Every structure is written in C-alpha cells, then in structure tokens.
Image: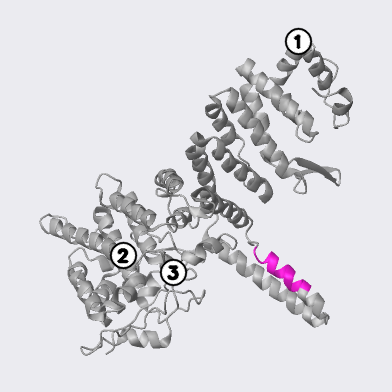
Amino acid sequence: MLGGDEFISSPPKKTVRFGGTLTDILMKYEKGETTDFELLKHQLSDPDIKKLPWLRRSREVVEEYLGFLGNLVSAQTVHLRPCLRMIVLQFVPPRITIREDDVDISDSDDDDENLSENFNTCHRALQTVARYVPSTPQFLMPILVENFPFFNKSERTLECYVHNLLQVTVYLPTLRLQILELIIEKLLKLDVSTPQQDIEDAEENANNSDNEEKSTEEGLFDMEEDEERKGNKVVSSSSERMAHPLAERLDILMTILFSYIKDVCHVNGKLDISNTKDLYRDLVSVFDKLILPTHASCHVQYFMFYLCSFKLGLAEAFLDHLWKKLHDPNNASVIRQTAGSYIGSFLARAKFIPVVTVKACLDLLVNWIHKYIDNQDKGANVYCDVALHGPFYSTCQTVFYTLIFRHKQLLDGNLRKGLSYLQSLNFERIVMCQLNPLKICIPSVVNLFAAITRKYQLVFCYTIIERNNRQFLPVVRSGSGGDLVQTCTNPLDSFFPFDPYILKRSKKTIEPFYQFWEELSAEDLENLKKPIKKGTSEDEDDDFLKGETPQNDGVVGIAPNSYESNTRSPLNSIGSPPDCYVPYPQ
C-alpha cells in the first residue's frame, strides 16, 4: 500500500465530497475501516467519476486505482456502466481551454507527451474490468457508439478514438465485428459526404494558390540554397495533407484501418492464414451490410481490395461472393447491379488477379448473359427496359469494362489462341440481341469496347451505336437563367467502385496493387481504327494499353462527338478511361 507522502507527491490530489482525500480513505480501508470506502463507491456511481484525475498520477497510484476499480465493479456491478464510460472518455486527447477575446475556445491537447502511455493504461483498466465482469462487452459497445466523436472534431481526436477502438478488438475479440461495423459506418458517412469532385476541386484550388505564392516569393527574394532545401522539405511534408478538411480526416482514418488489417493478418511479417480468414469473414459481413447498399462511395470499399491483395484465394472468394449476389434473383435488383459493378471494377483494377481468374469470371458472366437472352427470347418482355433487365445490363457492362482493361493480357503470348477464346464468348449475339445493351451501358465503355472488338474483328458495334444515337432523346430541364440544359443520362445509375483512389496518405497502400488506365496516344487511336490482318503473327501485340505499370495520372480527352455531348460518364476521374469515340474509317 502507498504511504501518504508518496501519494501526495503525485499531483493533483482528489478530494472526495465527504471530506478527506483518496489516500486517507484507502489507508483506512486497509486497516479495516470501510465506512468511507462505501461512501466513495456511492460517489463514483455518479457522473463525477469521469472527473477523477487518475491517469496523470504516479505509477503506484495508477496501479492502486486499477485494483480498486476491479474490486468496485466485482463487488457491485451497478457501477459498471459509469466506470466503462469514464474509461472510454479517456480514448481522446484531453481538452484544453484557450481564452481569446473573452471567449473560451476548447480544443484537444495534441502535445501531451504521455498520451500513448495514458491510452495503454485505459486499455489495462478495461481489461481489468472485463476480467472481473464477463458481461462487460455487451455494456461497453453502446458506450463506444455513444462517445464516437463528431467529424468536426480535430483530426487527432478522431485518429486517437478510432485507434483505441481497434485496440479494444485485440483483447475483446467478441466485439471486433461490431467495432469494425461502427468504424466503417462512420467512414462511409464521411466518404459519401465528400464527393470526389469536391476533393479534386479543393486540391486544384490549393495548388493554384501555392503556385501563386511561390511565383510571388521568387520575384521578391533570392533565397540561399540551404533555405531552398529547407523550404522544399516543408512543402514535401505538407503536400501529404488533403486540402479538403473532411478528406483529410478520411485519409487519416483509412490509413489507420489499412494498418490494422495488415497487423491482424501478419504475424512476425508472415501472413497468418487463420487470422486472415477470420478477419475476411468479419469484413465481408460489414461489406454486405453497409458498403454494398451504398451508392457511389469512393474510398471506404478499398478495405476489401487491400485485404484481397494478401492472397489470391481471398480475391477469388470475394469474386465468388459477389457473383452469388449478382445471379441470385432473390436479391434486390439494385444490389445485383451493384455487385456487377464491383466484379467489373475489381477484375479491371486489381493487378494481383491473374488472367486465368479473369477468364473464369468472364466465362461465368458471359454464360449467364447468354442464358438470360435464351430465357427472354421465350417471353414477352424482349425489349430495352432498365427496370426489367437491370442486372442483365449491369452484367454486360461488367464484361465490356473487363475486356477494355484486360484484353491485352487475354491476347498476350499467343494471339491466335487468345482470339479464339474471345470469339468463343460470342459477343456478337450479346450486342445484337433485342435487349440492346449498347444503348444502356455507359457511352465511354461502349465506345472503347466497340473499338477493341472491331480491331480484332470480334463484332462490329458502330451500326448499332449510330442507330441508338438517332433514337436517343435527350432529357432537358430548366437551368439557371431559364436556359434548357441537357441532363446527364446514365440509365443504370452505375459507377465503378474501384475507380482511382485519391487520398494522398492512404493511397500509398493501394497503388502497388492497382492497375491505372493510361491515356491513349494518337498512335493508339490509329491502331484501334485498323483491323488486325489475317497474316498477323501469333506474338503480335495490339498497342492499346501500355503495360501494367502506372505512368500517367492525367487523362486527355479524345475525339468527342455528339454522343458524348449527350451523356457524360462517371469515368472522367483521374486514371480512368476518358469518354471517347473512335469512328469507323470511311
């Protein structure tokens, strides 16, 4: 037990409301006088428990307090909730009050050197409570949800809280699924409230502002070399910050989530299959519940992309899971369409997926499409209608999109064998069917698919495209000033969930496994217009995609036509295929 002098030397002192100090009460309790101790337990049952400054005391005091906490909750579990709440409130940096112009401004104290040690002590306290009260997890989870910081709090506050939540899953594994669901739900809300276009605009404005400041400084000062190096160092460190404040928070939290996934799946630097499978099951469950029903999220879904990069078996399991969602008629149409978008985007963007897996997926998808066409030929609804045939059109777009990104690999090595495989998919029947998928799919995908299939003489799409153009009726609305403006028409309301990841810090985790789209040069466009010759050697390449390694982040729009002016696709983001039209040479 601590001596009185030792306790007093560890400021600050906590005076209990009925007189005396904690050290006096604890010393009396050791001698068998329990009256004051019982009064202290009643005091701890009210909200003032969170005001007890036990973290920033000497090690002996902290140890004594942890022992007292265990005795308290084991003797009377009525004190469990306030004790848990008191601990969880310490998951964020302490708040300090700064007075400016007679106004108190409260913010988190990010400069606390003992922050990491304090968090570790909090987790020890939680483990102590859980050891004495086995039902702790079911009482803890609502408190974790209730105290999750708002997004307008500082980045450091959010970072610390999420980090501590993930730390809880290490020693309370029964809560892992619920905690991951809570974190990903919050990240998803942050993601959808921060559109990619807003992030890109903020970055562009910040770059323009930095360039203006730089040009002004260069005109006014002739800086020394050492000062320039110092300035460049500052720029490089600040360049990782996102200009958009919500994007900055999302970037930090996604980095933490990626680090957690890596740490759980790897033990001593090696992939632990058992841990990885368990985490995969939890994350797939969260994916089904939160990600799949959410439209047009930009970044959060990449936790599945990153996890699947660890082992091919995980990627194949994920594709199989999405395939079951797509072809199950009991699922809602919108879920089936979204699952199709995920399959196409995953096959196109994941470098770690080999050609053999791409072929297996294409076989499944194309066979399903042909069976769907067979069934419709026997029915009365054989006409172009998104409401009736949404999953069919989504699957067609998935196949077209995958072919655009992967056709070079499918043809690589043995061109004749590759062409034979593509011909066996019978794209002509898909394109020519009465359901007319070229009319519904996104124009940028249709145009590039048409160019590639014409080059390799798989199917000629331009007659159908031109016919669809003539039948296309633009939708108009009243714009600002009373002008009539053509609206964007994307009948499937589709998106590609693994379009380029633009958060600066966390994208470093994704880029090694990511296939970027490379801009088309004038030579590429000319090659697309030339059909492949009959006498082509077996090892000839098609010069469409310039390898797998990303070289350019920018995209140059090419040859826009009337069709593009009517419809703009969501593929105009950095690193994605541009809206393009490759006309058939007259």
Residue 356, above or below 8: below
Crowd rating for badge 3 (residues with CA inside 10 Å; few <14, some 14–19, many 20+):
many
Of 311 and 417, the residue lying toward us: 311
Q: Secondary structure at mark 1?
A: loop
Magenta stretch: includes residue 234? yes
Pointer 3: what residue?
A: 515
Q: Residue at x 50, y 70 (%)?
A: 574
Magenta-highlighted residues: 230-240
Rendered location of residue 108, percent (x, y): 74, 45
Pointer 1: what residue?
A: 34
Rendered location of residue 116, percent (x, y): 70, 44
Q: Is residue 22 left or right of residue 324?
A: right
Display coloring: one colour
Q: Residue at x 49, y 37 (%)?
A: 178
Q: Can residue 459 be seen from the camera position used here?
A: no
Q: Residue at x 25, y 48 (%)?
A: 328
Q: Are marks 1 and 2 in contact (CB under 8 Å)?
A: no
The alpha-carbon separation of the residues under discs 3 and 2 comes to 14 Å
Residue occupying the far left of the picture: 378
Instruction: Locate residue 205: give its quadrant.
Output: bottom right
Magenta stretch: includes residue 475? no
Residue 358 badge? 2
Q: Main secondary structure of the magenta part?
A: helix
The alpha-carbon separation of the residues under discs 1 and 2 comes to 72 Å
